[in-house]
Image (cartoon, coloured by chain):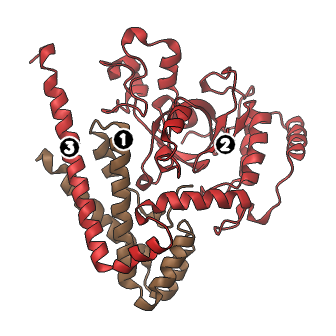
Chain colours: A red, B brown
Amino acid sequence: MPKYPAKTYEDINKDRIDVEFLRNKIKLKHLEAKKNFSEKYPYVEKFFREKGIDLAKIREHSAKLLGAGALTGALLLSPPTDGKTLPSPQEVVKALKERAEASPITQKLLVDSLAGILPEKTRSLTREEEKYLEQVFENVIGVKTKATLEGEHLNTTYGLIGAEQHLRRYPGDTLEQHGTGDVIKEGIAPGLGGWGYFAKSKNDLNERLEDTERWYAVVQTLYLPDWETRLSYLINWYKYRKVLIVNTVNGNAVVAAIADSGPAAWTGKHFGGSPEVMEYLGGKNYKKGPVVIFFVDDPENKVPLGPVDYNKINLSQSALIEI
Amino acid sequence: MSKLFFDHLIVWEEIDQEIKKVPLNREEKDELWKLLDEISANRILSSILDKLPLEHHEEFLDKFQKAPYDEGIFTYLKEKIGANIEELIKQEIGDLAYELLQDIKRKEN
């Protein structure tokens, strides 16, 4: 039965009931888990309190330690680069030029360069490793990037990306308006992106904002150690911030705009990509895979969103893999 | 990387899918995700401490607060506990996921 426009409040109320139901259930479970733990192990909270650490914020505490460790190279994890000494930026540029002359297949060159430095299992990269990759991306892909831009750094720059749904761009937006075929099979998120609607109305939606939703990325801003204390600054800084996403398995690269926060740590993933981003990175069935994400250093806003067509020659099958 | 040493054992795809069905805004989503994060951490720490002899609790907590991300903690735990602690945690996490799904999905019945 068609719904009268004046009765859309029924949908809104139902949505709020769903949200409140979920919140209440999870809050209750949280209280129960916390109470049980405190009663069973009262000395654990005391231990952390004496160290000045809030056990509820242990993830942020870990991020802080990892950030500091990456700077000094003093992580307790398996040694980065397996003890190899990384070349200087000048040496990287020289080596890339020599290798490009010997083998002009640039995407293959990128895949090989990444394989030479990245471990198979994703982990935090040291600043030295990130500097090396910045040189590789600039010289092979042609996009100037920074792992740390204007003092901001993601909690991780090498992790697993997962498929996200489309985001509503304006009130009344529907999945059908995002295209046809495979690109809409992921569906549309019932909630809004991290920064709400992209436009106030359909009339206000322009090509730039359409591209922002089409090529959007999701990063874990919620786990940044200073997210809550610097929220008013960071929320603006991250809004539609351009990032370069490189699939480390096949070298496919795309410039995307950050438009949502996530995924949750307990999903086993570290980043998310719009249906278009994911399809370009790994093909129609690509749901999850390792990527490197750096900020695009683009003060004049000249780098367009979307695929980075740096490969002028057909790739060998070994380099371009659909996952 | 924002990481705890047991993160790789938690992959709650189904819970993620359930939560994604609800129209949450960013603040609500962040809040729920953090609550779930805390619930899983409490349950995991509890299952570790249940198995670890009391005399090692302080040493373990010290290691954990100094490097919460260090998967090397598993080597220490295996040495002190003997049992395959990773499997025990997986079991605990699986049980918790089941309980959560029961709670979250109950409204659909």
Instruction: Give x and y (percent) for residue A32.
Output: 23, 65
How far apart are labels 2 and 3 at the CA level?
38 Å
Q: Chain of mark 2?
A: A
Q: Are marks 3 and 1 on the same chain?
A: no
State the image quarter where residue A153 is shown: top right
Instruction: Give x and y (percent) for residue A263.
Output: 44, 46
Note whether A29 is above or below B13 in the view shown.
below
Kindly identify which numbered label has been placed on residue A20. 3
**Viewer-nearest of labels 2 and 3?**
2
Q: Are marks 1 and 2 on the same chain?
A: no
SS at mark 1 in the image: helix
Kindly identify which numbered label has been placed on residue A46. none
Q: Residues within 10 Å of mark 2 (few under 14, many from 20)?
A: few
How far apart are labels 3 and 1 at the CA level?
13 Å
Q: Nearer the viewer, residue A81 or A185?
A: A81
Q: Amino acid at mark 3?
A: Glu
Q: Is residue A320 left or right of residue A60?
A: right
Give the quadrant of the N terminus of chain B: bottom right
Q: Amino acid at mark 2?
A: Gly
Note whether A311 is above or below A234 in the view shown.
above
Q: Amino acid at mark 1?
A: Glu
Instruction: Give x and y (percent) for residue A272.
Output: 48, 40
Q: What residue sits 57% from the left and 35% below the top?
A: A281
Q: Residues within 10 Å of mark 1 (few under 14, many from 20)?
A: few
Q: Chain of mark 3?
A: A
To which residue does mark 1 refer? B27
Kindly identify which numbered label has been placed on residue A151. 2
Q: Is residue A284 left or right of residue A89?
A: left
Question: Nearer the N terminus, badge 2 or badge 3?
Answer: 3
Q: Nearer the viewer, residue A227 or B39?
A: A227
